[in-house]
Amino acid sequence: MRQKSVVAEARQIRLASDLIRLGARLQVLEAETTLSRERLLRLYKELRGKSPPKGMLPFSTDWFMTWQPNVHSSLFMNIFHSVNSASALEPAEALVAAFRLYQEQVVLLGQPAVLSLTRAWRLLKFFECGMLAMARCTRCTGRFVVHAHDPVRRYVCGLCHMPARAGRGAHAAAH
C-alpha cells in the first residue's frame, strides 16, 4: 500500500482553494484535483460558507463566438498561452494564474469580467478537444477564438468589424 504524500495533498488543497476563491464549480474542482468529492464539499463550505451551486456546466462553443464573450475569451486565451509557455506550471495552476491576470486586465480597462472561471475552464476543454482554435485577424493581427474548422484565411475580428449594436448594453448606457 502506497502512502499519500503530505506535500502533494497540501498542493491539491491549495489548488482547490484557489479555484474555489475564483468561483470554480464543483465539477471543475473534481476534474482538476485529486481530492475526494466529500473533501471538496467541506473545503467549499469552509471557504464560501455555503454549498456549491448545482446544475449543468456550460456546454456550447457558440457562447464564445458572440461579440463580447469572444473578445474576453480571446483575451483570456492569449494570456493563458503566454503563462503556459513561459512557466512550468501544471495546467490547472496555469488556469488559475491566467484567470487572475485576465481579471486584473478587465479591472484596469474598467470593464466587467464577462468570463467566469468555470467558462474559462470550459474554453480550455474545448481547445483540448479540437472544437475551438485561435485565428489571427487580418487587420489588427490579434489572435481570436474561432470555431476550429471555420475558414480563417480572411478573418476579421469583432473589434475591427464591430456589430452594429456592440457596446450598447446596460454598461454603456450607464456611462
Image (cartoon, rainbow, N blue to C red):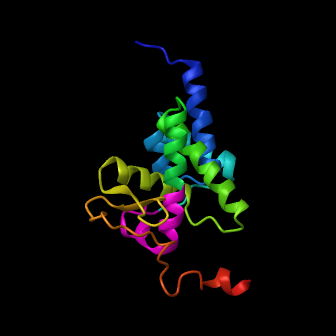
**Count of numbered tags:** 0
Look at the image and give the residue range highlighted in magenta. 55-75
Is 87 or 157 nearer to us in this picture? Answer: 157
The vertical placement of 24 against 62, above or below, is: above
The vertical placement of 125 against 111, above or below, is: above
Which quadrant is the N terminus positioned in? top left
Q: What is the chief secondary structure element of the magenta stretch?
A: helix
Residue 116 placed where, x, y %? 56, 60
In-image side of 90 versus 172 (left or right): left
Residue 155 visible, this angle: yes
Is 77 or 62 nearer to us in this picture? Answer: 77
Is 126 or 52 nearer to us in this picture? Answer: 126
In-image side of 125 versus 150 (left or right): right
Which quadrant is the C terminus positioned in? bottom right
- Asked if residue 69 is among those painted magenta in the image, a careful observer would answer yes
Residue 153 placed where, x, y %? 30, 63
The vertical placement of 119 against 44, above or below, is: below
Residue 42 visible, this angle: no
Residue beneath the point at 72% across and 84% down:
174
Residue beneath the point at 47% across and 48% down:
28
Residue 167 placed where, x, y %? 59, 81
- Asked if residue 70 is among those painted magenta in the image, a careful observer would answer yes
Residue 16 placed where, x, y %? 57, 40
Residue occupying the far front of the picture: 139
Give the quarter of the image for residue 157. Answer: bottom left
